[in-house]
């Protein structure tokens, strides 16, 4: 369909409708991730594809099963600006960059893996400018640069984000660079992220991420967007009520966001992550929660999900509260 849309824009309307009703954003077209194809056409100024890119990116990551891949980033220790020590992911992460021309386009990319808040990077740049320096440089490692620039918004133009981090223009982002970028843009604990990678995180099987891997189903782009959606949803929900040991009515209403009258295992897992302050990067604690939830599911015959009626059962409420308390007490 999208191939036809290159020649006949009317097919774009059909694609938008299919996206609206739940069509997959992670399919492939002749081996190329569909989103990559849409981005490519948008970059080539193909009529209508730039407008199609926005709903693609909005949907990407929303279909991930939270039971299979939890997306709760509940971290106390996150990356800071190395100058002012402000939390980095909420402060417009910015880097010193170089402009590289070639292949008919000019691309800014980072010169190193150091990120700063926008204010500090701008102040450093202006100080160096006032000193009439011939070249600018990263204040941490002194690598030379042409400019400072905020990290591109991955939710708007993921290819630009990828190119921004592709220092050698090789079509790959190495692991260290990607890790530093993730820590700058998401509330991630550095040690836990490295532990997840060491534990066999699929995204790092090759020690780097190619552009095709980045756009593919289960790739880094989908992982990032899924966590961004979770963070946005958490803001909309607000703070969850405490998990009582007798009646879950208020707790249930808070987590039944779509008013379906039932919570599945993934939703309960997300809720207990928050109750126990467990990050999805803490694989051991996540596994403990999953095992406990499975036992509750079997014990109370919740094959059709946890309903509001179930929440009136004091023993079930006590079991969930005890599970959250147990996991909260586990060492990270």
Image: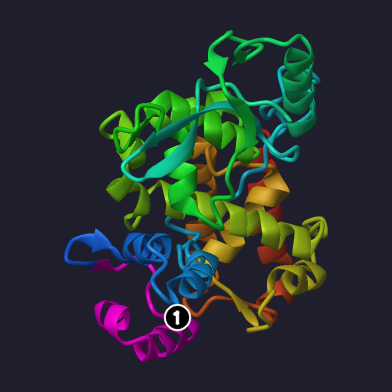
Q: Residue at x 43, y 50 (%)?
A: 159
Please indicate whether residue 53 sits to the left or right of residue 169 in the image: right
Q: Quadrant of the N terminus?
A: bottom left
Q: Quadrant of the C terminus?
A: top right
Q: Residue at x 41, y 46 (%)?
A: 220
Q: Main secondary structure of the magenta part?
A: helix
Q: Quadrant of residue 125?
A: top right
Nearer to the camera, 221 or 248: 221
Quick one: SS at disc 1?
helix
Query: Residue 32 placed where, x, y %?
Result: 24, 60
Residue 94 visible in the snapshot: yes
Nearer to the camera, 301 or 197: 197
Q: Quadrant of residue 28?
A: bottom left
Q: Count numbered badges in the picture.
A: 1
Please indicate whether residue 141 sits to the left or right of residue 166 in the image: right
Residue 291 visible in the snapshot: no
Nearer to the camera, 295 or 80: 80
Query: Residue 294 placed where, x, y %?
Result: 48, 59
Provide the residue designation for mark 1: 19
Please indicate whether residue 49 sits to the left or right of residue 271 in the image: left
Q: Is residue 255 above or below residue 310?
A: above
Query: Residue 100 placed where, x, y %?
Result: 43, 31
Please indicate whether residue 27 sits to the left or right of residue 139 in the image: left
Q: Is residue 232 above or below residue 130?
A: below
The segment highlighted magenta reads 1-28
User: Quick check: is 13 in the magenta stretch?
Assistant: yes
Query: Residue 216 placed where, x, y %?
Result: 32, 55
């Amino acid at each position: 369909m999208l191939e036809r849309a290159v020649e006949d824009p009317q097919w774009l309307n059909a694609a938008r409708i299919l996206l609206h009703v739940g069509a997959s954003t992670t399919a492939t077209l002749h081996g190329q991730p569909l989103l990559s194809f849409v981005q490519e056409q948008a970059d080539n100024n193909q009529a209508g594809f730039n407008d199609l890119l926005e709903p693609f990116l909005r949907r990407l990551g929303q279909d991930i099963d939270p039971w299979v891949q939890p997306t709760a980033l509940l971290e106390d220790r996150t990356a800071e600006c190395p100058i002012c020590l402000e939390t980095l992911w909420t402060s417009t992460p910015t880097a010193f960059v170089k402009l590289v021309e070639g292949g008919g386009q000019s691309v800014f990319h980072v010169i190193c893996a150091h990120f700063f808040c926008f204010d500090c990077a701008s102040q450093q740049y202006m100080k160096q400018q006032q000193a009439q320096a011939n070249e600018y440089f990263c204040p941490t490692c002194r690598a030379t640069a042409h400019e400072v620039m905020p990290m591109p918004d991955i939710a708007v133009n993921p290819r630009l984000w990828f190119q921004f981090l592709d220092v050698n223009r090789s079509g790959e982002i190495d692991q260290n660079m990607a890790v530093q970028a993730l820590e700058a843009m998401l509330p991630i604990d550095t040690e836990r992220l490295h532990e997840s990678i060491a534990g066999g995180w699929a995204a790092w099987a090759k020690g780097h991420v190619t552009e095709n891997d980045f756009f593919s189903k289960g790739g880094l782009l989908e992982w990032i967007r899924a966590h961004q959606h979770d963070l946005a949803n958490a803001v909309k929900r607000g703070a969850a009520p405490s998990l009582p040991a007798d009646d879950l009515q208020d707790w249930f209403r808070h987590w039944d966001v779509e008013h379906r009258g039932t919570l599945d295992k993934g939703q309960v897992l997300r809720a207990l992550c928050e109750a126990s302050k467990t990050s999805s990067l803490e694989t051991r604690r996540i596994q403990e929660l999953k095992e406990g939830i499975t036992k509750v599911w079997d014990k109370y015959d919740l094959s059709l999900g946890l309903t509001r009626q179930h929440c009136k059962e004091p023993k079930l409420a006590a079991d969930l509260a005890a599970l959250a308390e147990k996991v909260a007490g586990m060492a990270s």
